[in-house]
């Protein structure tokens, strides 16, 4: 089947389930078209339109069900579910009884029932409900600002900047064994012993996630802005008070669109990765990719490093645009230096002594870590060194860690995708 036909089949299946998609779904579908099917943004947009997919941004699920936020917040969970189910049942049955009559809001009754189901599912789930309240209160907080909706939230007709899509390109890392860790006498014990590890094939982002890419995420998911006085994610330790410290009102620092995003917690990186249909790399995946196919070499390019290879040792004293320095043999840019990168694994200084030799991951399985991400408040692995790191800390075997909810000017991330997904 041709790539175009494969993509059309995906969109057809989606449209048969529902004509309504979120703006983040639209962006994800356009990314998928460009990265996986070789289509242009314009071609993919035309296909979405041809199947009548409608973007419905910032639906107030309380308004959909005719429930007041204050009313819900005075109830216990059992009473909330009863109230939501009663409202949903009444409106859903009324919609069924209406048949095919046109609605004043322009939606079909089928589309309206889809919204009713989405509202019920959101308000019946305590975490989703609180995130939805945070988003609505955030919208109220910024309602008086001069920034227009079209500037902060991509419209249905607005295309994704091509530069962003180029940055989002991924590199295939082939399956196979490599030597992980290091046995040199002068390196920390947590990097020992050097051992052979087999890793399945995967795709990894060519560059770390940039400020402009992360802005697309928070514009589509306002609950992940720094919400100040009502920061749900801060309350539940998904990020600290320094999250996006160098941003102002949802905007990254002027002139730094192509710089890697920093001041990002592990939980925030996990949320972004999930939004784009990816995940964070395991520590083994990261090191295999960083080595670029080389064996027993200190750095991604060999045994030496200097300031023509990477941004490190405070020589620039801040991040630099991605892609400024040479790539490794796999074609990865900024894999060491510039910004350290979150990995999926839970930190374990003794992990190499007992880890699996095939697709190792510390803490649990990949699936379990992703499923329980918001509940895990542990130290997580970071790799790669940053603009602040010494030459020694840029070694591909060097391991470090940070609490999952902490942020730093030195830490960002890049994403991976398994080949079979």
Image: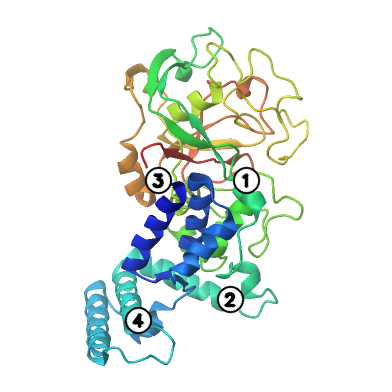
Q: Which mark is residue 377?
A: 3
Tell me: 101 left or right of 292: left
Going from N to C along the chain, the mark reached first, 1 or 4, is 4
Q: Position of residue 157 (x, y in %)?
A: 58, 69
What residue did someone put label 2 on?
141
Task: Determine the secondary structure under disc 1.
Answer: helix
Q: Is residue 330 above or below residue 212?
A: above
Task: Determine the secondary structure under disc 2.
Answer: helix
Going from N to C along the chain, the mark reached first, 2 or 4, is 4
Whole-number angstrom distance, CA of label 2 to CA of label 4: 28 Å
Is residue 404 at all visible to an observer of this figure? Answer: yes
Tell me: 394 left or right of 99: right
CB under 8 Å between discs 2 and 1: no
What residue did someone put label 1 on?
166
CB under 8 Å between discs 2 and 4: no
CB under 8 Å between discs 3 and 2: no
Task: Determine the secondary structure under disc 4.
Answer: helix
Looking at the image, is mark 2 or mark 4 nearer the viewer? 4
What residue did someone put label 4 on?
112
Q: Position of residue 175 (x, y in %)?
A: 41, 24
Q: Position of residue 154 (x, y in %)?
A: 59, 67
Circle 4 packing at 10 Å, graded few (<14), some (14-19), many (20+), is: some
Whole-number angstrom distance, CA of label 2 to CA of label 1: 34 Å
Looking at the image, is mark 3 or mark 1 nearer the viewer? 1
Looking at the image, is mark 3 or mark 4 nearer the viewer? 4
Circle 2 packing at 10 Å, graded few (<14), some (14-19), many (20+), is: few
């Amino acid at each position: 089947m041709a790539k175009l036909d494969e993509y059309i089949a995906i969109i057809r299946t989606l449209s048969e389930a529902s004509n309504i998609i979120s703006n983040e779904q639209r962006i994800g579908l356009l990314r998928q078209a460009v990265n996986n099917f070789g289509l242009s943004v314009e071609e993919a947009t035309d296909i979405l339109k041809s199947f009548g997919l409608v973007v419905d941004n910032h639906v107030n699920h309380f308004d959909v069900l005719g429930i007041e936020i204050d009313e819900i917040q005075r109830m216990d969970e059992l009473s909330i579910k009863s109230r939501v189910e009663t409202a949903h049942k009444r409106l859903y049955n009324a919609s069924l009884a209406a048949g095919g009559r046109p609605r004043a809001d322009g939606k079909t009754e089928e589309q309206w029932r889809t919204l009713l189901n989405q509202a019920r599912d959101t308000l019946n789930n305590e975490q989703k409900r609180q995130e939805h309240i945070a988003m609505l209160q955030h919208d109220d907080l910024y309602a008086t600002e001069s920034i227009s909706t079209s500037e902060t939230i991509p419209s249905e007709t607005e295309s994704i900047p091509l530069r962003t899509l180029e940055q989002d390109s991924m590199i295939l890392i082939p399956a196979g064994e490599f030597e992980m860790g290091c046995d040199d006498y002068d390196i920390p014990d947590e990097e020992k012993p050097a051992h052979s590890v087999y890793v399945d094939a995967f795709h990894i982002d060519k560059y770390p996630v940039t400020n402009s890419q992360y802005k697309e995420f928070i514009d589509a998911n306002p609950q992940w802005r720094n919400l100040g006085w009502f920061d749900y994610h801060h309350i539940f330790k998904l990020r600290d008070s320094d999250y996006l410290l160098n941003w102002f009102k949802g905007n990254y620092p002027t002139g730094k669109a192509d710089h890697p995003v920093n001041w990002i917690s592990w939980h925030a990186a996990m949320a972004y990765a999930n939004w784009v249909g990816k995940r964070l790399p395991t520590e083994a995946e990261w090191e295999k990719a960083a080595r670029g196919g080389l064996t027993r070499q200190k750095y991604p390019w060999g045994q030496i490093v200097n300031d023509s290879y990477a941004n490190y040792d405070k020589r620039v004293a801040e991040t630099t645009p991605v892609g400024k320095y040479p790539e490794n043999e796999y074609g990865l840019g900024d894999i060491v230096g510039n910004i350290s990168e979150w990995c999926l694994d839970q930190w374990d200084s003794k992990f190499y002594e007992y880890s699996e030799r095939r697709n190792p991951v510390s803490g649990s399985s990949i699936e379990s870590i992703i499923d329980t991400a918001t509940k895990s408040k542990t130290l997580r692995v970071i790799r790669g060194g940053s603009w602040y790191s010494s030459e020694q800390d840029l070694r591909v075997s060097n391991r470090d860690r940070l609490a999952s909810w902490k942020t730093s000017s030195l830490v960002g991330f890049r994403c991976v995708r398994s080949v079979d997904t």
